[in-house]
Image (tube, rainbow, N blue to C red):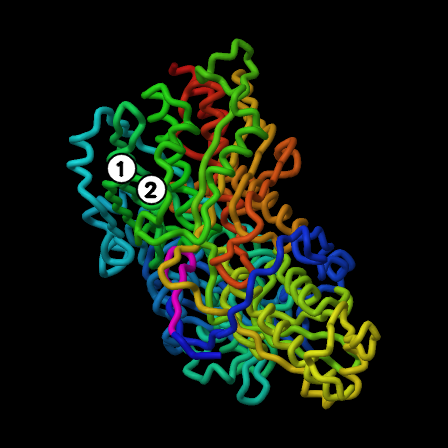
């Protein structure tokens, strides 16, 4: 192994780290059809634990002598706290301590604001105090007794108005997050438009969406001497460890973070929460474990969202369909604290366009801050890009699919490198066949019935290549059970399962001989689980550990039998020589020293100059009731190039979940703000319309067009979490247009928008 600097994309940003990488150069495994476990529909490793209630989530952690925290949050969108009276709250039965900006030092919080508590509150939901009590009820009752006096300040919940405001300053630096817009250009767009024979320009908008995972955000903190132990519902245990250690000014080695099971995150749990730091501070002061659990209203107000977007796109092309220029301008509402809302990456990378210019503004408002949300930026950007692609194709009389293929990019458009694999054309072909593309309306909206059907498509590009450092250790116990340890996370997506499959495949042993241990910072380092990077980062490390273990087993078998390694044959957990079985793994493990059968696995470097991306196309068939405006999604075909499938069953689970989330974004989900009072009007699961099974497509068909991506990593794997969702809303929107002949340019596509659009036309 070597220590090297490596970099890869993670949630739209380059991640550059120095860490240990494997120097081994493994050949790709055979295609999945020739493998026993990998790629098969293996039931979830943790399935029984979850359905039986044995799985322990952070929400389930209850320690002896534990107490409870409740965060008091601002009820106004912007103001300065003139006074805070905690006397009545502090005298409430069971109350142990109350943290406020007046009695809490600045812990150098570097997350969603610079202070743990700020005298200035900037949105409904901003943290004001944290009450700790013997019971949750005691804490909640005390919170009601705290009296706050505010100096109310001007506020704004709309990004465009905040951007243009001369009187409102949400931060001293102004109302633009990240100081300046994110700009990109190649070629010369002015020249490109001058050379164009046809210009298409339009504006599209998307809404703010809330993550709303099943398991709420929560933490339990407990000090054991000088060591802090945290149980946290998180997508990044090492991120939580490092953030909390930094804020407390202690060594990272003195913080242990554990997350065994988790009920979803979708990006909202990639950061450490202030509630985690509050629990740690209170636990230190009280010398007792402290648990803080956010309620559903807090989940809607204060732990992140997908920012909205207003995007203006201008496309210049020749009459033969060749695109010459693309201009993309967007503005996004990222809430009250620094975050990014750019959505132009699809415009930069999806098609072969010589002249491109993009400008993304991220704007502060007095609302809850945005966070990464399953393919940040790409879902919004794909909706607008695929809409204008369809409109441009119609303007020149070209089939929308043919138009996309006409402008197909063979190489990466931003860096110019070769793709590790790109089989998008194959995805287009089979997806079109499965949806019945030839039967779509040649003239949108031409059906005579009040029930109109339509077919649409959208394309996706996403990184999902992962990279080092990522580690997994393997140990064979005396009883022959193989233990795999990694500090990565399983978010409910199947990480436990695919790790067990890889270990069983390489060692040629039954799955019930594998025990997987995840979600603990005392285990080998694993990166945060986001950006579709978990499988392509960790699976190569697991293979490395297993391949090294197999080598150790050869040397152990040789030592125990006095037969040279070159005369030993390994198969299905046993060694033989001259067709006679002589020793198996269990017997070897029982006879060697307990620490001898131990290996360290690491992920290898990414290949320099090769760009690893996922590609895919989704096709949607919808039925629109033009009397009510209701949209029913009949079928989704998802055809993707995402490398080797590790588990077909969990892959389909991922796609079904992503498609349902995309359907919600297309048709029902939206944060609704009262602009007069700066309050969210639907901060609950009743009024925030997440789709249910009654809204699910009648049929979802998932097609993976390649066996493996040989250049991505030693497992040939790319990520699928984001690709599953990215094109769904755009495909549904294009299908609605094909059905009714009127373009709905803002999401979600609700019945009133359809009725109004049809009436106006």
- Marks 1 and 2, how far apart at CA: 8 Å
The majority secondary structure of the magenta stretch comes to strand
**Among the two numbered marks 1 and 2 on one chain, the one whose residue lies closer to the N terminus:** 1
Badge 2: few (under 14), some or many (20 or more) residues near its Cα, within 10 Å? Answer: many
The residue sitting at 46% across, 20% down in the picture is 755
Residue visible at 41% across and 20% down in the picture: 742
- Is residue 427 visible in the rendered image? The answer is yes
In the depicted view, which residue is nearer to us: 590 or 688? 590
Residue receiving disc 2: 347
Give the magenta range. 5-14
Residue 598: give x, y in percent of width and height.
65, 82
Q: Nearer the viewer, residue 209 or 521?
A: 521
Q: Position of residue 295 (x, y in %)?
A: 57, 57
Name above or below for residue 188 compared with residue 253. Answer: above
Residue 105 x, y percent position in the rendering: 39, 78
Q: Label 1, on which residue?
A: 326
Q: Looking at the picture, does residue 315 appear above or below residue 233? A: above
In terms of image quadrants, where is residue 577?
A: bottom right
User: Is 650 on the left-hand or right-hand side of 613?
Assistant: right
Q: Are marks 1 and 2 in contact (CB under 8 Å)?
A: yes
The foreground one among 391 and 323 is: 323
Q: Say whether residue 8 is magenta.
A: yes
> Image point 32% across, 21% down: which residue?
396
Mark 1: secondary structure: strand
Q: Is residue 62 left or right of residue 684?
A: right
Q: Quadrant of residue 109?
A: bottom left
* Residue 510 percent location from the top left of the image: 77, 65
What residue is rendered at 41% in x and 63% in y? Answer: 607
Q: Residue furthest front?
A: 578
Specify the quadrant that holds the C terminus.
top left
């Amino acid at each position: 192994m070597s220590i090297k600097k490596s970099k890869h994309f993670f949630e739209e940003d380059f991640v550059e780290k120095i860490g240990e990488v494997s120097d081994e150069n493994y050949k790709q495994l055979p295609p999945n059809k020739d493998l026993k476990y990998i790629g098969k529909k293996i039931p979830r490793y943790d399935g029984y634990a979850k359905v039986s209630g044995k799985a322990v989530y952070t929400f389930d952690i209850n320690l002896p002598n534990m107490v409870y925290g409740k965060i008091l949050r601002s009820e106004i969108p912007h103001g300065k706290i003139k006074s805070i009276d905690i006397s009545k709250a502090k005298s409430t039965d069971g109350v142990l301590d109350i943290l406020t900006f007046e009695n809490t030092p600045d812990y150098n919080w570097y997350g969603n604001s610079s202070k743990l508590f700020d005298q200035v509150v900037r949105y409904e939901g901003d943290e004001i105090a944290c009450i700790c009590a013997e019971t949750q009820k005691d804490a909640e009752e005390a919170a009601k007794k705290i009296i706050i006096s505010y100096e109310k300040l001007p506020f704004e919940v709309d990004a465009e108005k905040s951007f243009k405001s001369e009187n409102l300053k949400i931060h001293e630096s102004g109302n633009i997050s990240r100081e300046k817009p994110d700009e990109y250009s190649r070629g010369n767009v002015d020249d490109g438009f001058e050379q164009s024979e046809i210009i298409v320009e339009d504006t599209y908008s998307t809404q703010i969406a809330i993550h709303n995972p099943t398991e709420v955000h929560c933490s339990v903190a407990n000090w054991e001497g000088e060591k802090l132990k945290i149980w946290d519902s998180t997508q990044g245990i090492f991120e939580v460890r490092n953030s909390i250690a930094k804020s407390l000014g202690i060594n990272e080695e003195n913080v242990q973070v554990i997350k065994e099971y988790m009920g979803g995150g979708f990006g909202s749990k990639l950061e450490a929460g202030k509630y985690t730091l509050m629990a740690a501070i209170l636990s230190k002061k009280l010398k007792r474990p402290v648990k803080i659990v956010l309620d559903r209203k807090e989940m809607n107000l204060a732990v992140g969202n997908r920012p909205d977007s207003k995007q203006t796109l201008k496309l210049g092309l020749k009459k033969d369909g060749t695109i010459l220029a693309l201009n993309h301008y967007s503005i996004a509402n990222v809430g009250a604290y620094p975050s990014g809302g750019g959505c132009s990456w699809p415009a930069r990378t999806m098609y072969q366009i010589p002249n491109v210019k993009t400008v993304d503004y991220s704007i502060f408002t007095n609302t809850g801050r945005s966070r990464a949300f399953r393919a940040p930026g790409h879902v919004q950007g794909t909706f607008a890009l695929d809409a204008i692609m369809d409109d441009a194709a119609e303007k020149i009389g070209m089939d929308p699919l043919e138009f996309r293929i006409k402008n197909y990019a063979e190489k990466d458009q931003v860096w110019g490198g070769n793709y590790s694999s790109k089989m998008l054309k194959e995805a287009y072909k089979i997806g079109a066949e499965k949806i019945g593309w030839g039967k779509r309306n040649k003239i949108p909206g031409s059906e005579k019935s009040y029930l109109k059907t339509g077919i649409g498509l959208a394309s996706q590009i996403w990184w999902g290549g992962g990279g080092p450092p990522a580690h997994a250790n393997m140990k064979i116990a005396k009883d022959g059970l193989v233990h795999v340890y990694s500090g990565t996370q399983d978010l409910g997506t199947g990480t436990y399962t695919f790790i067990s499959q890889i270990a069983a495949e390489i060692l040629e042993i039954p799955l019930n001989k594998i025990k997987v241990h995840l979600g603990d910072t005392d285990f080998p380092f694993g990166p945060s689980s986001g950006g579709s990077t978990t499988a392509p980062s960790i699976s190569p490390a697991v293979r490395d550990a297993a391949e090294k273990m197999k080598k150790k087993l050869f040397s152990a078998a040789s030592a125990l039998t006095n037969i040279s390694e070159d005369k030993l044959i390994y198969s299905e957990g046993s060694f033989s020589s001259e067709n006679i079985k002589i020793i198996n793994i269990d017997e070897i493990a029982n006879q060697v020293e307990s620490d001898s059968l131990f290996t360290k696995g690491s992920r290898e470097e990414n290949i320099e100059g090769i760009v690893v991306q996922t590609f895919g196309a989704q096709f949607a068939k919808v039925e629109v009731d033009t009397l009510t405006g209701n949209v029913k999604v009949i079928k989704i075909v998802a055809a993707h190039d995402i490398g080797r499938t590790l588990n077909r069953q969990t892959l389909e689970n991922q796609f079904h979940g992503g498609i349902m989330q995309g359907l919600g974004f297309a048709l029902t989900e939206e944060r609704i703000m009262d602009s007069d009072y700066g309050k969210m009007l639907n901060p609950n699961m009743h009024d925030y319309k997440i789709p249910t099974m009654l809204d699910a497509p009648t049929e979802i068909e998932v097609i993976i067009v390649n066996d493996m991506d040989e250049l991505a990593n030693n497992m040939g794997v790319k990520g699928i979490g984001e690709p599953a969702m990215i094109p769904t809303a755009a495909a549904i929107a294009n299908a609605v247009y094909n059905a009714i002949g009127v373009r709905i340019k803002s999401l979600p596509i609700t019945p009133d928008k359809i009725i109004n659009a049809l009436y106006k036309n």
